[in-house]
Image (cartoon, coloured by chain):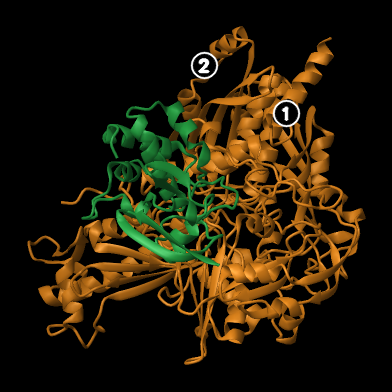
Chain colours: A green, B orange
């Protein structure tokens, strides 16, 4: 059985007929072909699939697409400016070498955006605790923490 | 004039695409008309396959193909080969039991692939896979290396489940050294099994074209050419030129994506059977049971010394768990990449190491970040630190008394170190870690009711694998050179093709720095291409921290050819003798004059050869080079770890972690530091949180998800102090050694030395979880009562 689901993704209204069991991440990757949102595990532990739903970071592998009916979703593809200029958080990751293979990176950035809204000048410990739900196997987190501290300052509480 | 690019912290060229979601990993690739594969895997550690019924699955909605082991056997699809032949102590070849791509007759570990179901959609394939009915007769199983020789036989013709017994070193001389020792330090431990867990799960898409009888395989691989060679020549029997292997963006490897896996073969083969592209992406739970694991050694190690703490000899006996089958390079990891490193940074004159490799009912084990060298470093550095404590010597002092101080140095275990300065990294690490302030910090911890400890590890590793002739004489079934091609375009921009592969290491930046620096052109004018057998001439790929030392050198050799040809062209254009032409930062100059041609002008002349020395030169400016290294490279360094332990909970907190490495010349310090940080956390993971566990009764993988296998998270680890010292490698033109694995090699021993120091015990098993440490604290407090 398929159901129609409609939402806004990166500012654009989208809709499709999907199976009821279709995960939000599957809808984003397969139906919308926005492949920047990644799947790294099947137990909602790695955070590679993190997107913003109505401004809040969520793991898009742990809800079905229908639960996002009418929601405003932002994926990594919607973060940079329309002209391609990196968002300050993205720029901070680049500047501080906060990524290596890049696979966990979209989830890290999306989680960081939500976190930085309420933490314009976070401590190292606050950042480390905020990253509890995101795994990285490459960086040892050192430079991700630096990136988010710098990115949060640059954002000054505003996405 | 351009600033020098070698040694510059250049921001990475690849970052933009990864930061904007524009990376293209294998699972992001969607081929027209692609079908989806799901593997049916054994839920049992050891079982006979009495009957596999696939009729129901075949009739399920959307299913277009179901295949089992017999189908592959009937089609003469071979098993997965092992790339390294180890010859045992009796001169006999190791046992190489068949490793079928789909199980035949028996399943030998939980997760062994038994059937594949291919359907129009992934959901349909999953649903149908549930309908494959396998009648298993469960057999007794064993997962432990130490019990393997007495366990039920896993393979026909492999008695005692023993793959080989292998040894290195002079046993008689070693025993004689121990006989005259004033003191012997002995340790027995397990180097715990790890699951690599690159965050991108493995994935593969096979496609076949009837139009030209050719195949394309997209695969998350660290070495697409090796993958192609193994698959075509040894498994599918296909002509290599009909198979293109693409490893696009790859989300981390750490060794686990070196190997040829069954799934890669099956999707490629099935693509022709069904005349459809076939895609498979591992779920994480599949990754846990099907990606090659790492480590899993059981070791007894002894160090003999005189009354001054001077090392006289080392004796090591290791049993290494190979898992259920031999993975691609499994056999060389606990031998060639392990025993040869047991000299460490020290002048130990005699060393003997015996290794027994065994089969068990577990996922195959192969090279994982460091591959043999973390295990060797753990042996040496745990022994040395323990010896210092037993001899009442400062742990830095005992190391200083035994450091190798003149180079080249021939170890008793085959390697010849070309250069190093171990005193320099030790001294720098001590300063950076503020070792003199440790006592005061310890007293403060004690005042808070906590324990504090400090541990060192002074590691060495052999990178830049490897001189092909040496590797061949040791059993390698492949060459270990690297290839590079420099294509200068008519307007002077450059595309470089490398056989190395980047899956996080940042080659597109580091290699571009080398090229731009060498040619004296802007880095924006240089692009690096890797990971596609249809573009890159050849390649052995990335593992063993070999990319810059071997792959980088191949590029430098090609650049030298470009400059040499450019000089000939410039000499013609400038009407000068070739011997008078100098190349300096983008300009071909006639020595001692102001006559010159820019690099771009020479490139243009090569492609628009109107005024050109046609009698002597071909047009065009495109060169390739193959580089076979003269020796291994020998990165080394000292790590200092300081921990605080909560007596009530057993929680270990890493208060300080300092790493000073000697990687030779450094191209991009920012990237090198990142490699060290990542390696450190993988090593810390091994020591503190990660441990693969099988149920000892039934062989189930107990740590089969991120809920159970404890990956280090951001709040488990500290920030690091890292620095470098530099003794340039003597046998490659860049003076580079490699940096990818050091962190994972040195950190477990440093951390365990700190924990045992804090607890005042001889040994603690890895991972030193809070529970493990707490148990030690209980035993100690009971002992005090």
Is residue B232 in view from this perspective?
Answer: no
Q: Quadrant of residue B176?
A: top right
Q: Is residue B66 above or below residue B481?
A: below
For disc 1, the marked residue is B771
Residue at figure coordinates x 83%, y 42% from the top left: B175
Q: Secondary structure at mark 1?
A: helix
Q: Are discs 2 and 1 both within one chain?
A: yes
The answer to whether B472 is drawn above or below residue B144 in the figure is below
Q: Secondary structure at mark 2?
A: helix
Label 1: how many Cα within 10 Å (few below 14, some 14–19, many 20+): few
Residue B249 as seen in the image, left or right of residue B388: left
In space, the residues marked 2 and 1 are separated at their CA atoms by 31 Å
Q: Name the residue carrying label 2.
A: B436
From this viewpoint, which residue is outermost toward the left?
Answer: B594
Query: In the depicted view, which residue is nearer to us: B537 or A46?
Result: A46
Which one is earlier in the sequence, the residue at label 2 or at label 1?
2
- Specify whether residue B592 is in view: yes
User: Percent position (x, y) of residue B435?
Assistant: 52, 20
Q: Identify which residue, B403 or B720, lies in the foreground.
A: B720
Give residue B183's position: percent from left, percent from top: 79, 27
Is residue B577 depicted above or below B758 in this figure?
Answer: below
Q: Nearer the viewer, residue B178 or B512?
A: B512
Give neighbour class at mark 2: few <14, some 14-19, many 20+ (Cα, 10 Å): few
- Please state the chain letter of the residue tagged with numbered disc 2 in the rendered image: B
CB under 8 Å between callouts 2 and 1?
no
Q: Is residue B411 above or below residue B637?
A: below
- Residue B784's label in the rendered image is none
Q: Position of residue B301 (x, y in %)?
A: 77, 39
**Quarter holding residue B559:** bottom left
């Amino acid at each position: 059985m398929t159901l129609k689901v409609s939402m806004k993704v990166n500012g654009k209204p989208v809709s499709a007929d999907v199976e009821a069991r279709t995960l939000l991440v599957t809808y984003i990757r397969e139906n919308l072909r926005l492949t920047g949102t990644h799947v790294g595990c099947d137990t909602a532990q790695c955070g590679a699939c993190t997107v913003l739903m109505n401004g809040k970071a969520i793991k898009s592998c742990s809800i079905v697409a229908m639960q996002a009916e009418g929601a405003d979703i932002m994926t990594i593809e919607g973060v940079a400016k329309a002209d391609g200029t990196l968002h300050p958080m993205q720029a901070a990751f680049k500047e501080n070498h906060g990524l290596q293979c890049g696979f966990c990176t979209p989830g890290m950035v999306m989680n960081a955006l939500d976190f930085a809204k309420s933490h314009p000048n976070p401590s190292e410990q606050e950042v480390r605790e905020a990253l509890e739900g995101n795994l990285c196997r490459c960086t040892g987190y050192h430079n991700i923490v630096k990136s988010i501290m710098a990115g949060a300052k640059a954002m000054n509480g505003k996405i | 004039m351009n600033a020098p690019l070698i040694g510059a912290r250049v921001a990475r060229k690849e970052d933009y695409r990864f930061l904007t979601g524009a990376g293209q990993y294998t699972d992001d690739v969607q081929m027209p008309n692609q079908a989806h594969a799901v593997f049916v895997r054994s839920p049992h550690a050891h079982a006979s396959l009495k009957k596999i019924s696939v009729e129901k699955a075949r009739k399920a909605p959307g299913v277009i193909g179901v295949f089992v082991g017999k189908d592959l056997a009937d089609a003469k699809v071979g098993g997965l080969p092992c790339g390294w032949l180890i010859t045992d102590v009796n001169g006999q070849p190791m046992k190489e039991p068949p490793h079928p791509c789909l199980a035949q007759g028996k399943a030998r570990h939980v997760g062994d692939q038994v059937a594949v179901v291919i359907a129009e959609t992934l959901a349909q394939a999953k649903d149908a896979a549930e309908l494959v009915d396998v009648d298993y007769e469960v057999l007794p199983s064993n997962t432990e290396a130490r019990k393997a020789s007495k366990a039920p036989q896993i393979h026909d013709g492999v008695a005692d489940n023993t793959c080989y017994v292998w040894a290195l070193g002079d046993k008689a001389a070693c025993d004689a050294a121990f006989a005259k020792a004033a003191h012997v330090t002995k340790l027995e431990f397990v180097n715990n099994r790890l699951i690599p867990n690159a965050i991108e799960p493995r994935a593969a898409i096979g496609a076949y074209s009837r139009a030209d009888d050719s195949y394309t395989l997209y695969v998350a691989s660290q070495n697409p050419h090796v993958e192609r060679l193994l698959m075509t020549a040894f498994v599918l029997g296909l002509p290599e030129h009909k198979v293109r292997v693409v490893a696009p963006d790859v989300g981390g490897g750490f060794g686990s994506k070196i190997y040829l896996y069954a799934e890669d073969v099956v999707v490629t083969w099935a693509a022709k059977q069904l005349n459809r592209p076939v895609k498979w992406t591992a779920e994480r739970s599949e990754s846990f049971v099907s990606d090659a694991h790492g480590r899993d050694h059981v070791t007894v190690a002894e160090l003999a010394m005189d009354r001054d703490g001077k090392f006289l000899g080392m004796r090591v006996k290791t049993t290494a768990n190979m898992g259920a089958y031999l993975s691609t390079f499994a056999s060389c990891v606990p031998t060639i990449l392990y025993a040869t490193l047991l000299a460490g940074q020290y002048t130990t004159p005699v060393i003997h190491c015996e290794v027994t490799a065994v089969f068990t009912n577990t996922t195959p084990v192969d090279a994982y970040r460091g591959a043999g060298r973390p295990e060797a470093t753990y042996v040496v550095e745990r022994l040395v630190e323990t010896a210092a404590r037993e001899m009442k010597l400062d742990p830095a002092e005992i190391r200083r008394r035994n450091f190798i101080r003149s180079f080249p140095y021939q170890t008793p275990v085959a390697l010849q170190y070309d250069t190093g300065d171990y005193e320099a990294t030790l001294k720098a690490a001590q300063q950076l870690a503020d070792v003199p302030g440790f006592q005061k910090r310890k007293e403060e911890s004690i005042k808070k009711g906590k324990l504090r400890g400090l541990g060192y590890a002074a590691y060495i590793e052999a990178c830049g694998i490897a001189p092909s002739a040496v590797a061949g004489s040791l059993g390698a079934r492949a060459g270990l050179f690297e290839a590079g091609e420099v294509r200068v375009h008519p307007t002077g921009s450059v595309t470089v093709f490398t056989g190395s592969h980047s899956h996080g290491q940042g080659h597109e930046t580091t290699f571009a720095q080398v090229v731009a620096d060498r040619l004296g052109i802007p880095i924006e004018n240089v692009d690096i291409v890797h990971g596609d057998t249809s573009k890159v001439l050849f390649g052995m790929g990335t593992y063993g921290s070999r990319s810059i030392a071997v792959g980088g050198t191949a590029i430098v050799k090609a650049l030298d050819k470009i400059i040499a040809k450019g000089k000939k062209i410039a000499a013609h254009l400038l009407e000068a003798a070739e011997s008078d032409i100098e190349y300096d930062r983008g300009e071909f100059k006639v020595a001692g004059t102001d006559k010159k041609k820019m690099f771009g002008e020479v490139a243009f002349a090569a492609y628009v050869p109107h005024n050109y020395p046609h009698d002597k030169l071909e047009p065009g400016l495109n060169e390739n080079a193959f580089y076979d290294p003269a020796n291994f490279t020998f990165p080394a360094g000292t790590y200092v770890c300081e921990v605080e332990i909560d007596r009530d909970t057993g929680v270990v907190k890493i208060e300080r972690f300092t790493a000073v490495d000697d990687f030779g010349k450094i191209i991009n310090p920012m990237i090198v530091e990142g490699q060290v940080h990542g390696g450190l956390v993988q090593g810390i993971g091994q020591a503190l949180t990660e441990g693969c566990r099988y149920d000892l009764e039934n062989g189930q993988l107990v740590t089969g998800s991120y809920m159970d296998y404890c990956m280090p998270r951001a709040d488990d680890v500290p920030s690091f102090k890292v620095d470098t010292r530099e003794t340039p490698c003597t046998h490659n033109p860049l003076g580079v050694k490699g940096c990818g694995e050091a962190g994972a090699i040195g950190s477990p021993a440093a951390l365990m030395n700190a924990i045992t120091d804090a607890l005042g015990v001889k040994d603690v098993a890895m991972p030193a979880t809070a529970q493990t440490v707490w148990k030690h604290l209980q035993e100690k407090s009971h002992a005090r009562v």
